[in-house]
Structures are given as structure tokens and as C-alpha cells.
Amino acid sequence: MNLGGSNQRFGIYWLAFGYTLALHVLDEAGHDFLSVYNPNALAIRRVLPFLPVPVFTFRQWIGSLACGLAVWLALAPLAFRGPKWLRRLAIPVAILVGIGNALGHILSSIYLRRLMPGVYSAPLILLMGIVLLRSALGMERVVAADVA
């Protein structure tokens, strides 16, 4: 399957990451993520008071995620042009929001021996984080069949 040039693929992966992230937010919201997150945030604050770990109401949490997703998707037309600054922005987002977030959900589910909120969509976020990161770094492999 030919997805076009490097900029075209980066734009497609940018959009796919955004939509996958939106699905992940729905997964977390539907499985009461804050009932797990907030008590842990408060426990971390007690042990490490210098660490500014936020505690959220549902409205604050969903509102901030919706704004972040809206900005991400609003930048999609630019992603199809592949500017360097946008590729640089995609690197920490792919690592932290994609790969790190997904691994946090998966590994905490394994460690606690129960399914944590957000774990159902975590493999998709992990995959799209890796794909976006590879694209942003210009590490995509071109399959011989796509070139011909």
C-alpha cells in the first residue's frame, strides 16, 4: 500500500495518532480513570510534596484533554506539509503521550493484576506512538513493493 511521500505519511500518522488518542480518552473516561488516578496523585503528593502532581475534577480533566486533542487535530493540515518544527513537536508527544502512557496502562495492569482504565486502547496508542515517532524521526522503511 502506497501512502504517498514522507510528508503525506507524516500527516496520515498525525491524524491517526489524534484519533487513536481520542479513542483512548473515551476508554479512560468510560472506565472511571480519575477514580484510580486522583488517589495515586494525592499519595505521590504526600510522599514527594515538591512534585506538582495535579488532581482533577472530571470536568477539568476531560476539558483539558478535549482542548489538547482539538489543537492536535487543528494542526493536521500543517502536518501534511511536514514542517521541521511540527516533526520536532511530534517526537516528545509520541514518546510521552503515546509510548509512555500506553506502557503505563499496560504495565500497571500487569503489576496490579487487574485491568486498569485505559488498558483496552493502550496497545493502539503504543502502536501509533511508535509509528508517529518513526515518521517524525524520518526512520520509515520503504517496502520494495511500494516503490515499484
Image (cartoon, grey):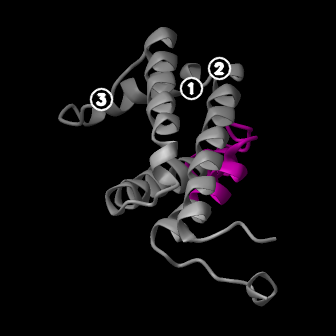
Secondary structure state at the residue bearing disc 3: helix
Q: Position of residue 120 (x, y in %)?
A: 76, 40
Dot 1 surroundings within 10 Å: few (below 14), some, or many (20 or more)? few
Q: Nearer the viewer, residue 60 or 15?
A: 15
Residue range highlighted in magenta? 103-129
Dot 1 corresponds to which residue? Answer: 36
Q: In this view, does 29 lie to the left or right of 51?
A: right
Kindly identify the residue that appears in the image at 81 percent across and 71 percent down: 1
Task: Say if 42 sits above or below 143 in the image.
Answer: above
Q: Are marks 1 and 2 in contact (CB under 8 Å)?
A: yes
Please tell me whether residue 108 belongs to the stretch shown in magenta: yes
Q: Nearer the viewer, mark 1 or mark 2?
A: 2
C-alpha separation, residue under disc 1 versus residue under disc 2: 7 Å
SS for callout 1: helix
Q: Distance between the residues labelled 3 and 2?
A: 21 Å
Q: Which of 49 and 136 is in front in this view?
A: 136
Q: Which residue is farthest left?
A: 50
Whole-percent x and y of residue 39?
47, 22
Say which amino acid is labelled 2: Asp
Q: Which of 109 and 17 lies nearest the eye of the viewer?
A: 17
Label annotation for residue 45: 3
